[in-house]
Amino acid sequence: MKRTCLIILILLLVLTSLAVVLRFDPRSLVCRPKMWGMPLLADIALIDDPEFIVVPVTINSKRYRFFVDTCTVNSCVDIRLKPLLGDFVRTSKNVPNLSNANLDIDYYKLPENFRLGFLKPYGVIGCYDFSVIGDLTAYDGIIGMNLLNDNLLQLDIENKRMRLVRKPSSAEADSQEDPNYKKELGYPIPLIRDERDWPYIHIRLSDTINELFMVDTGLRGHNYLRRESFDKLRAKEGTEYERVQDGKEQIEAIRIAEARLANIKVSPMVFIANPQSVLGTKFLKYFKMVTFDFRDDKLYLKPMIDTPSHNAARESGKSTGTKVHKSGYSSAIHE
């Protein structure tokens, strides 16, 4: 009897030690390794896609295509995945979206076997018909800010990977953040957030125009510039303008010879007029690495060449043939 009790005690001690070493979370049943001394929630290969930042999400051990959208509040799935979801929770009526058609979005409990890398999130997820807001039916779901907020989101464009790191607050006792990790991330840019937590940055387009741009990883197509700033730059002597293809139409665009994001020079940048200034994946994909620090409100950019001057946006004016929504950009929903 004593021998049996001793064996059981030894097994319990071994299991406890393994749990500490692997950072085992008994609630999520997921082992969490670390990166820069912080819990690594996801380190996954990007799915090749010409439009969005697309990552695999597993439900019932089957992979689905989700794109990452920093300007969608709540994660959502297409109505095709409704049978996989948990219990119904509520309906949000007349949610404004960026295709000028209000949506009714049903919310369900996340299924127990929903996985994004090592992360097993809890809570609810939205569900609606993706076909009503444009050509999004090639995708199964959207990763929104409810899964990204307060974390480090790293888009490693060069190595085609996405990493999500949980950044503890300074008040957390177990915070062991590596103080030198920021040196790996590139040039820091101040990140401004609105009431929905959507990210913005300033770009200096001229001596007199320091424009505030939404950074929208759910945007495909052109770079967009607010009409007032567009007209001012167009009227400025020496500004180049051209016609860019937009579906079946030719649209006027302006070419900025030199723009600056803090100490990074980006040239040239091509913009079409829009009610709001927005940058999306077409711009971000011309950097080696883009890291959003949603805890400390910083955007880190690592240029394709290791110098403050580069041509990251040279191709950003080329058309993808994507139809521009009347609202000007194509993130899914406001809610």
Image (cartoon, rainbow, N blue to C red):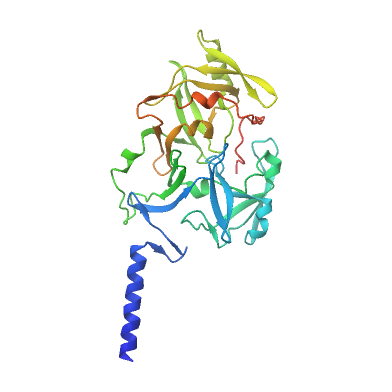
Depth check, front residue: 331 or 160: 160
Left or right of 40: which side holds 113?
right
At x 34% / y 87%, what residue is drawn? 4
Q: Quadrant of the C terminus?
A: top right
At x 35% / y 27%, what residue is drawn? 307
Left or right of 322: which side holds 181?
left
Q: Quadrant of the N terminus?
A: bottom left
Where's residue 194, x and y in %?
A: 50, 37
Residue furthest top as drawn: 237
Depth check, front residue: 129 or 52: 52
Left or right of 203: which side holds 93?
right
Query: From this viewpoint, is residue 280 visible?
Result: no
At x 36% / y 26%, what residue is drawn? 308
Q: What is the total number of numbered labels drawn onto the structure image?
A: 0
Where's residue 41, x and y in %?
A: 44, 53
Residue furthest bottom as drawn: 1
At x 46% / y 31%, what residue is drawn? 201
Picture layout, residue 83 above or below residue 180: below
Left or right of 155: which side holds 89?
right
Query: From this viewpoint, is residue 193 visible?
Result: yes
Where's residue 151, x and y in %?
A: 43, 47
Where's residue 94, x and y in %?
A: 69, 43
Picture layout, residue 189 above or below residue 39: above
Residue 63, quarter of picture: bottom right
